[in-house]
């Protein structure tokens, strides 16, 4: 029975539809769909030479001298070609009937592939080939290989792109003076070179994208991004916000009752925030600071400025434990100063909730602290002037927007976002749309460094002894249970088992347990006991990951540390080292360790600097995964690399600034043309 390869569905998807799936709608889209690599079809060598080169990819040309279908060991098409210097077998395991005819004896064929010396002599398996006439010209440029999608072959893509190149409007969006100043190539020759590089091109520079043609394309891409960011910023500034101009009694009194002095870094970021709050347009600022750097007090002082100016402030945290901790701390500071602080979370009783809603709506509550319960529609503020989002990366863009929309009559509250997951500066500036960044780069004084050690799981007994010794010295201990992503039930089981085991091994100690499935009130009882130093050891799942602050805890044990990500380990470890006692973090691991896990644990041992950890994390994972697709405008950047092209980012930022501020019709036209070419419909990535 004649076998033919599987036929594709009768009515195939049109080429246009397939191109559209890759985001290629317009001619310019196609033109900017650049090759990921190239094939060199510019040369033909003799079969004799090719046989000498064996193993390399080469292109030969010959006449078919024999064409047969063999059945051993399986059905295959064998085509012998000869060019007078030698002969060669082309072997096809999958082939169409039409190919048998196409490669009939006497046909001239050009074949390109890896030459192997097999049992039956020299051969190429599944070479790329073309039937040609004698003397058919060779291409003079390298052949592009494009990123493609399902069912979209290279020839179809090449043809579509080639045609688009002829039709497209090549007008350079950058004025000649600018190109000259920045020594940028012109767009048309740059793009053409990237699609069809001449034979003698520096192929290495093409592949690592350091070629000047790439520089031009990357610059254009980055410029479009910067222009669009800055325009979003302008749009924000066109919105009205209450200017919070008064730093008054509350701010002063609050600073006076604090049990410590602000660090220089806290003072500096507070000044930055305070200046933003005075503006009549919404602040949108990210406050970054490593775990334990003291962001909470900065946010409380920002809230005080809002309250002093006659407005309300809201502080939202991602977990109930964290929100409650903020509430207690801040209420303890503010209520004695006569400021009513409301507390709102999903677990409140119906009556309590209603009471909170009423206080918020009447304006009696000047500050509201809570979880995402704050986002509910029923929550209406009397006059919200500032919303603060702690651990902002834990919230979605939509949630942050909801809080921003809780102002009065279109007045947008100022927004302060906080994060201990440090984002390298270039990333923050280019990935987050329209965001100012303040960084606390100094820890409060008197912290002793945390010593971190990785220990094989089978030395658990020694670790338990160590826990015992620490408790005898009056220290408190966190014992974090393994993360089991696949099963919450299993994770819970492990936590309960670990708790039982430790309670048994340490009969003279009070060992507590806290996990995500407990009711908020139950959690609170445990946390309170631990905070009050009535409990020696707290066995916990990752619920303690963010924000928990018990300065007397100085030993942290993390089980199956190899299962955690770097930033998670860093967050967990940040629960200790908050007091003056020397702190220790023990990372228990199960051997053998994989390569990435090994790298992570090594990083944890080597540094406690959150920014350095973030940088290495970025190295291990890449920016897309690092930020999470939802927050990143990664679809925006296809060509430029923020690390290696940082200098271009700077240039693009300066040029964008100049173009937008010059206010001449020519420059305005440049901006429009450039954005239209590069972003088309993609600007929505930058809206938040
Ligand atoms: P994070 O930035 O991780 O949110 P916190 O705001 O929870 O850090 O602060 C960590 C601890 O440091 C808290 O116990 C806080 O009271 C304390 N703290 C904050 N600022 C200072 C300071 N300037 N001097 C001493 N301790 C401080
Ligand atoms: Mg915090």
Image: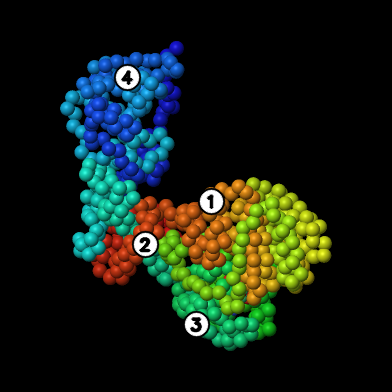
Name the quadrant containing residue 24.
top left
How far apart are labels 4 and 2 at the CA level?
52 Å
How far apart are labels 3 and 1 at the CA level?
50 Å
Return the x and y of residue 337 as percentages of the image width and height.
65, 84
Name the quadrant containing residue 642.
bottom left
Closer to the chain start, of discs 3 and 1, is 3
Give the residue at mark 2: 646
Considering only vertical position in the picture, is 54 above or below 374?
above
Residue nearer the viewer, 395 or 350: 395
- For disc 1, does the CB lie below 8 Å from ligand 1? no
Secondary structure of the residue carrying numbered label 3: loop
Closer to the chain start, of discs 1 and 2, is 1
589 left or right, relative to 441: right
Return the x and y of residue 164 as percentages of the image width and height.
27, 43
Label 2 Cα neighbours within 10 Å, binned few <14 / some 14-19 / many ≥20: some
Residue nearer the viewer, 676 or 317: 317
Residue beneath the point at 53% across and 70% down = 289
Closer to the chain start, of discs 2 and 3, is 3
Considering only vertical position in the picture, is 561 above or below 358?
above
Give the residue at mark 4: 79
Label 3 Cα neighbours within 10 Å, binned few <14 / some 14-19 / many ≥20: some
Give the residue at mark 1: 596
How far apart are labels 1 and 4 at the CA level?
47 Å
């Amino acid at each position: 029975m004649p076998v033919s390869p599987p036929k594709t569905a009768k009515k195939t998807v049109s080429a246009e539809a397939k191109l559209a799936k890759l985001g290629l709608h317009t001619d310019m889209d196609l033109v900017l769909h650049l090759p990921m690599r190239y094939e060199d079809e510019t040369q033909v060598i003799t079969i004799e030479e090719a046989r000498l080169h064996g193993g390399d990819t080469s292109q030969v040309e010959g006449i078919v001298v024999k064409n047969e279908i063999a059945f051993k060991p399986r059905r295959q098409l064998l085509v012998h070609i000869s060019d007078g210097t030698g002969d060669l077998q082309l072997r096809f395991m999958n082939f169409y009937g039409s190919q048998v005819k196409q490669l009939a004896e006497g046909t001239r064929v050009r074949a390109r592939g890896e030459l192997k010396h097999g049992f039956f002599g020299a051969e190429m398996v599944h070479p790329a080939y073309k039937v040609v006439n004698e003397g058919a010209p060779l291409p003079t440029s390298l052949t592009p290989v494009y990123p493609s999608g399902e069912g979209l072959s290279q020839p179809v893509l090449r043809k579509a792109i080639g045609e688009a190149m002829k039709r497209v409007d090549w007008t350079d969006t950058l004025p000649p003076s600018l190109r000259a100043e920045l020594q940028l190539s012109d767009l048309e020759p740059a793009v053409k070179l990237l699609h069809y590089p001449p034979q003698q091109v520096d192929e290495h520079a093409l592949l690592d994208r350091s070629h000047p043609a790439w520089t031009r394309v990357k610059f254009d891409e980055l410029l479009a991004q910067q222009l669009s960011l800055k325009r979003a910023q302008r749009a924000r500034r066109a919105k009205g916000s209450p200017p919070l101009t008064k730093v008054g009694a509350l701010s002063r009194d609050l600073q006076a009752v604090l049990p410590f002095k602000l660090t220089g870094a806290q003072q500096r970021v507070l000044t930055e925030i305070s200046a933003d709050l005075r503006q009549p347009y919404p602040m949108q600022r990210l406050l970054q600071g490593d775990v334990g750097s003291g962001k909470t007090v900065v946010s409380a002082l920002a809230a005080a400025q809002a309250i002093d100016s006659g407005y309300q402030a809201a502080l939202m945290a991602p977990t109930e434990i964290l929100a409650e901790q903020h509430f207690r701390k801040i209420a303890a500071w503010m209520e004695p100063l006569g400021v009513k602080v409301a507390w709102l979370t999903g677990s409140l009783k119906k009556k309590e909730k209603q009471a909170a809603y009423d206080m918020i709506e009447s304006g009696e509550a000047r500050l509201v602290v809570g979880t995402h319960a704050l986002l509910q529609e029923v929550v209406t503020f009397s006059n919200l002037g500032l919303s603060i989002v702690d651990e902002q990366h834990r919230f979605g863009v939509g949630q942050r927007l909801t809080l921003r929309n809780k102002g009065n009559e279109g007045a947008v509250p100022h927004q302060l976002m906080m994060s201990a997951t440090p984002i390298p500066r270039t990333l923050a500036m280019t990935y987050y749309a329209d965001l100012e960044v303040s960084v606390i780069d100094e820890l409060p004084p008197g912290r002793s460094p945390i010593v971190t050690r990785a220990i094989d799981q089978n030395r658990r007994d020694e670790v338990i002894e160590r826990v015992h010794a620490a408790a005898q010295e009056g220290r408190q201990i966190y014992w974090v249970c393994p993360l089991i992503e696949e099963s919450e039930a299993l994770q819970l089981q492990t936590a309960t088992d670990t708790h039982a085991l430790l309670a048994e091994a340490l009969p003279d100690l009070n060992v507590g347990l806290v996990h995500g499935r407990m009711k908020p009130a139950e959690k609170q009882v445990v946390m309170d006991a631990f905070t009050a130093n009535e409990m020696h050891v707290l066995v916990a799942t990752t619920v303690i990951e963010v924000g928990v602050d018990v300065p007397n805890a100085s030993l942290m044990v993390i089980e199956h540390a190899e299962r955690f990500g770097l930033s998670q380990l860093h967050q967990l470890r940040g629960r200790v080292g908050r007091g003056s006692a020397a702190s220790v973090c023990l990372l228990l691991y199960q051997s053998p360790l994989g390569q990435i896990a090994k790298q992570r644990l090594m990083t944890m041992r080597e540094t406690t600097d959150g920014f350095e950890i973030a940088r290495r994390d970025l190295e291990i994972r890449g920016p897309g995964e690092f930020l999470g697709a939802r927050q990143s405008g990664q679809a925006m950047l296809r060509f430029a690399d923020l690390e290696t092209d940082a200098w271009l980012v700077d240039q693009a930022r300066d040029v964008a600034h100049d173009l937008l501020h010059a206010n001449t019709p020519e420059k305005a036209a440049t901006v429009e043309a450039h954005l239209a070419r590069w972003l088309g419909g993609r600007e929505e990535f930058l809206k938040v």
